[in-house]
Image (cartoon, rainbow, N blue to C red):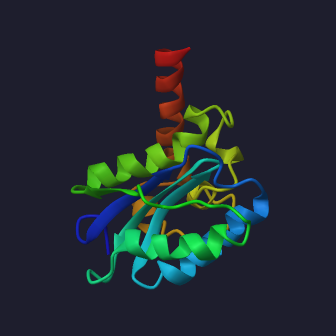
Amino acid sequence: MDFSSGTFIQLSYKHKGKLFDHYDQYFFFLNKYRIYVGDFSEVIAYCMLPDSFHFLIEILDSNQDPSFQLKKLQNKIFARYRKEIILDNIEITKLNSEQEIENKIYEIHFMPVRLGYIDTPDDWEFSSYQEYIDLRQGTLPRTEELKSKYSDIKEIRYNTESLIDDFDMLYK
């Protein structure tokens, strides 16, 4: 399978305060995400930040609504940590081309750098970037399609890091 067929969407949620205060909350969220949303979708890329999460997924079962499933998670995830967070403004963006999908993967992986949490995407633990460049052998993101388009992971790293250079030129 490749990016030229299928239904690909980006799910994003930004909270006014902190969603995740501790490392265990990120892991707990990812595990519950896998249970509730993973049955009908595959993660292509993700990034979780203290106040937001961003997932690029392929919908495998068109009868399921990913935002509805994520809303079901809110009680299970955030109640455990005594947080009253309502996932009512999940933004869903449908991606219509392979180029849009590839650009979104790079953009998602670049978010922690753009927001000033880190200097390089290699350093952000709660992102699928580490799987894409073989720093970690995780099982959540499906990385084969993008990896197959390049001769090696250096090209993936280059494309993501070129965003850092563009960002530095524009904003520093």
From the top left corner, tell me how far across and down residue 96 is, in percent: 21, 57
Q: Nearer the viewer, residue 5 or 74?
A: 74
From the top left corner, tell me how far across and down residue 149 is, in percent: 38, 58
Q: In which quarter of the image is residue 97?
A: bottom left
From the top left corner, tell me how far across and down residue 104 is, in percent: 39, 49
The residue under the point 45% across, 43% down is 107
The residue under the point 52% across, 61% down is 86
123 lies above or below 7 = above
From the top left corner, tell me how far across and down residue 10 is, in percent: 37, 58
The residue under the point 78% across, 56% down is 22
39 lies above or below 22 = below
80 lies above or below 156 = below
Q: In which quarter of the image is the C terminus?
A: top right
Q: Can residue 23 be seen in this view?
A: yes
Q: How many labels does the image show?
A: 0
Q: In which quarter of the image is the N terminus?
A: bottom left
Left or right relative to 11: residue 161: right
Left or right relative to 157: residue 21: right
Q: Can residue 139 be seen in this view?
A: no
Left or right relative to 109: residue 121: right
Q: Nearer the viewer, residue 115 or 1?
A: 115
Q: Nearer the viewer, residue 91 or 60?
A: 91
40 lies above or below 78 = below
